[in-house]
C-alpha cells in the first residue's frame, strides 16, 4: 500500500467541508489561491463524488455575489472559499448586502498562521474581525497541528461542531435574521496532501429553509368572516394553525379602526398581498417586493401617497420587507402622526421614524373592513394604471377592399412595429415575458424605478440587491440565482434588467469556466451611455453640465457586442418592441446579452 502524504491542513479542510455537506450545504463557490489549496482540493473531490456543485470564479467579489444569489434563491447558505489578503477583503460587498438583506452566506477565508500576522509577511493582513459588524457568527479557528487518519480526532470533532454552529447562525438562529458567517482558517505548510479516505458523501438530502414556491396554487379567496381573527405571521403563512405558543411571539392584534395601508418593500413576498386581502387594506407593493399582485394592489402609488385625500389621510402603515424605491413611502414612514408597524423580516429592522413597532406576528381583529377607504384607493388606482401593451392591429382595416383604408392600416401597423423603444416599453416587455417558472433580477439602475412606476400586477419570483441598493454584483447575483433555480433541469430563464453602468461594474461576472454548466440567463441592458439616474436628482439642477457629466453621468463608449464575444455570450441588439419581444421569448439555451439603446 502506498504511503499516504498527510497534511493537517487537508484533513482539517476535509472535516469542515464534509460536515457542511452533511448539514445540507450543496454549493461551494471558490476562487483559486495558494493558502486555500487544501480547501479547494477537498471541494473538487466533493464535486467529483456528486456531493456538491462547485463554481469556480477568479474574482472574489464575483464569487461572493454568486454565493449571495444562491442563498437568495435557496435560503440555504452557499460556501465561499478564498485565499488570504485582499482576496478576503473582496468579499466585503457581498457580506454587507447579505447582512442588510438577510441572506444566508458562509465565508471561509484561508489565512497565514498567527505568528506571521503584523510582521510584514507576504499576502497577510488582519483578517479576523474584517466582517465583524455584519456577521451572525465569526471565528478565527486554531491552526491544524495534526493529521487525522481516522477522521475522529479532537480537531475533526471540533470542526464538525464549528460547521453546525456556522450553518445555524447563517440561517438566523439566535438573531432572527439570516446573514453572513465568517470562519477564518489559518493554515501552515504543508498545505497540500492526500484526501483522507474517510471524507464521506452527503448522508441526507439538504434541509432547505422554507421559501416562496412560485409554482404553488394561488391563495384561495377568503370571506370576511373567515378573515376575521386570522393570523399573519412573518414568513410563516396564514391560518390559526400558525399561532405561536411562545409567550414572546403572541400576535399583535390589529383593530379595524385606523385607516391602514400595507407597504411591501424588497423581499416582502406574497405574504404582504395575503395580509392586505385579509385586512381589506390597500396594498402598496414595490416592483421588487414579490407582492405586486392581487385585487388590493395600488397602481401609481407614488402620486397617490402624495395625494392629501389618500396618502395624507393614512393613520397606520404595516410594513413588510425593505422599502427603498420611492421618497413618498419614506415620507409616510417618517411622519410622526402615522403609526408604523414593521413585521420582522430577513433584513435589518425598519425604524425610520424612531418609533416604529417591530412585530413577529399579526392577528387581523374581528369586524368589517373599511370599504370606503379601500374603495377610494382602488378607484384612484384604476385611474392611475398604465396600459403599455402595443396597440392591436386593426384587422378590419387590414382586410378592407378600400385601398385607402388598407394602406392606412398598414402604415399604422408598420409605424408601431418600427417605433423605437423607451424605458417604459423596455420594462413592460421584460415583465410580460416573465412567468412563475422564471426569475427576474432588477439591478439598482434607473430602470427599476421606471418599472416600479409603470408596471402592473403579476405574481412572479423577483430578486434584487436592495439591502444596500448598490449596483455591484448584479450579474453575479443573478448567475447564482439561475444556477440554483435551474438545478435538476428545472425549467425557466433568469432575466436580469439593468443599466449599462451596472453591467460594466460587474462585467467580470460574465466570465464562466468552460467546464461548468451554463445557466439559462438573459442580461437585458438599457444602454443610455452613462448614469442617467443622476439626471433625475437635485444635483442635475445645480451642477455645471461639464462637471455633471464628468463625475456623475460618467459617459462611456463601450462596445457591448465585443464584451459578449470575449466572454462567450450570445449577443443581440434590439431597437424596437417587436424585436425585443422576439429576443426575450425565443428559445434560450445558455447566456444571452440583449442590448437596448436608449436616449439619455
Image (spheres, grey):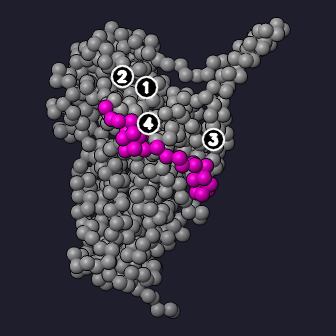
Main SS of residues in magenta: helix
Asked if the stretch drawn in magenta spans residue 555, the answer is yes
Q: Which residue is mark 2?
A: 302
Quick one: SS at disc 2? helix
- Would you place residue 212 above or below residue 90 in this image? above
Crowd band around label 2 with a 10 angstrom C-alpha radius: few (<14), some (14–19), many (20+): some
In front here: 498 or 272? 498
Quick one: SS at disc 4? helix
Residue 573: assigned label: 3
Q: Which residue is mark 1?
A: 453
Give the mark nearest the N terminus, 2 or 1. Answer: 2
- Would you place residue 406 above or below residue 493 in this image? above
Residue furthest toward the right?
401
State which mark lies toward you, 4 or 2.
4
Asked if the stretch drawn in magenta spans residue 553, the answer is yes
Q: Which residue is mark 4?
A: 532
Contact (Cβ within 8 Å) of mark 2 with mark 1:
yes
- Find the distance from the CA under tag 4 to the CA under tag 2: 21 Å
Crowd band around label 4 with a 10 angstrom C-alpha radius: few (<14), some (14–19), many (20+): many
User: In the visual, does 100 lie left or right of 291?
Assistant: left
- Find the distance from the CA under tag 4 to the CA under tag 1: 17 Å
- Find the distance from the CA under tag 4 to the CA under tag 3: 20 Å
Magenta residues, start to end: 542-568
State which mark lies toward you, 2 or 3.
3
- Find the distance from the CA under tag 1 to the CA under tag 3: 25 Å
Amino acid at each position: 500500500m502506498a504511503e499516504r502524504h498527510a497534511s493537517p491542513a487537508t484533513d482539517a479542510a476535509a472535516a469542515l467541508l464534509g460536515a457542511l455537506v452533511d448539514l445540507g450545504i450543496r454549493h461551494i463557490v471558490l476562487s483559486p489561491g495558494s493558502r486555500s489549496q487544501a480547501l479547494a482540493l477537498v471541494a473538487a473531490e466533493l464535486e467529483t463524488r456528486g456531493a456538491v456543485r462547485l463554481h469556480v470564479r477568479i474574482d472574489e467579489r464575483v464569487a461572493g455575489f454568486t454565493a449571495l444569489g444562491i442563498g437568495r434563491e435557496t435560503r440555504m447558505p452557499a460556501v465561499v472559499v478564498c485565499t488570504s489578503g485582499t482576496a478576503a477583503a473582496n468579499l466585503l460587498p457581498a457580506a454587507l448586502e447579505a447582512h442588510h438583506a438577510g441572506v444566508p452566506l458562509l465565508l471561509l477565508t484561508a489565512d497565514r498562521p498567527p505568528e506571521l500576522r503584523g510582521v510584514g509577511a507576504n499576502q497577510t493582513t488582519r483578517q479576523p474581525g474584517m466582517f465583524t459588524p455584519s456577521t451572525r457568527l465569526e471565528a478565527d479557528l486554531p491552526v491544524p497541528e495534526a493529521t487525522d487518519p481516522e477522521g475522529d480526532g479532537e480537531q475533526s470533532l471540533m470542526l464538525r461542531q464549528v460547521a453546525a454552529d456556522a450553518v445555524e447562525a447563517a440561517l438566523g438562529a439566535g438573531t432572527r435574521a439570516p446573514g453572513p458567517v465568517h470562519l477564518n482558517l489559518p493554515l501552515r505548510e504543508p498545505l497540500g496532501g492526500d484526501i483522507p479516505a474517510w471524507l464521506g458523501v452527503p448522508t441526507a438530502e439538504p434541509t432547505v429553509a422554507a421559501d416562496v414556491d412560485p409554482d404553488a396554487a394561488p391563495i384561495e379567496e377568503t370571506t370576511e368572516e373567515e378573515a376575521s381573527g386570522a393570523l399573519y405571521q412573518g414568513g410563516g403563512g396564514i391560518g390559526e394553525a400558525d399561532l405561536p405558543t411562545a409567550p414572546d411571539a403572541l400576535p399583535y392584534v390589529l383593530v379595524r379602526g385606523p385607516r391602514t395601508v400595507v407597504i411591501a418593500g424588497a423581499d416582502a413576498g406574497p405574504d404582504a398581498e395575503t395580509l392586505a386581502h385579509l385586512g381589506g387594506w390597500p396594498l402598496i407593493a414595490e416592483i421588487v417586493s414579490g407582492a405586486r399582485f392581487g385585487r388590493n394592489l395600488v397602481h401609481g402609488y407614488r402620486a397617490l401617497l402624495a395625494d392629501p385625500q389618500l396618502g395624507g389621510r393614512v393613520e397606520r402603515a404595516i410594513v413588510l420587507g425593505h422599502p427603498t424605491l420611492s421618497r413618498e413611502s419614506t415620507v409616510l414612514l417618517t411622519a410622526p402622526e402615522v403609526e408604523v408597524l414593521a413585521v420582522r423580516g430577513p433584513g435589518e429592522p425598519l425604524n425610520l421614524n424612531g418609533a416604529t413597532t417591530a412585530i413577529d406576528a399579526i392577528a387581523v381583529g374581528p369586524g368589517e373592513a373599511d370599504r370606503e377607504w379601500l374603495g377610494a384607493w382602488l378607484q384612484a388606482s384604476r385611474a392611475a394604471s398604465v396600459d403599455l401593451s402595443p396597440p392591436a392591429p386593426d384587422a378590419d382595416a387590414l382586410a378592407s377592399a378600400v385601398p385607402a383604408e388598407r394602406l392606412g392600416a398598414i402604415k399604422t401597423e408598420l409605424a408601431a412595429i418600427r417605433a423605437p423603444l423607451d424605458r417604459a416599453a423596455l420594462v413592460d416587455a421584460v415583465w410580460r415575458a416573465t412567468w412563475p417558472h422564471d426569475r427576474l433580477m432588477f439591478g439598482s439602475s434607473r430602470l427599476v424605478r421606471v418599472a416600479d412606476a409603470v408596471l402592473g400586477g403579476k405574481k412572479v419570483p423577483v430578486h434584487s440587491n436592495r439591502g444596500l441598493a448598490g449596483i455591484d454584483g448584479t450579474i453575479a447575483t443573478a448567475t447564482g440565482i439561475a444556477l440554483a433555480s435551474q438545478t435538476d433541469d428545472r425549467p425557466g430563464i433568469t432575466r436580469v434588467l439593468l443599466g449599462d453602468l451596472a453591467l460594466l461594474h460587474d462585467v467580470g461576472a460574465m466570465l464562466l469556466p468552460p467546464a461548468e454548466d451554463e445557466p439559462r440567463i438573459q442580461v437585458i441592458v438599457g444602454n443610455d451611455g452613462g448614469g442617467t439616474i443622476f439626471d433625475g436628482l437635485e444635483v442635475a439642477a445645480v451642477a455645471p453640465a461639464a462637471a455633471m457629466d464628468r463625475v456623475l453621468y460618467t459617459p462611456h463608449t463601450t462596445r457591448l457586442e465585443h464584451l459578449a464575444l470575449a466572454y462567450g455570450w450570445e449577443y443581440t441588439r434590439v431597437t424596437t418592441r417587436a424585436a425585443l419581444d422576439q429576443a426575450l421569448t425565443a428559445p434560450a439555451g445558455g447566456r444571452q446579452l440583449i442590448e437596448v439603446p436608449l436616449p439619455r
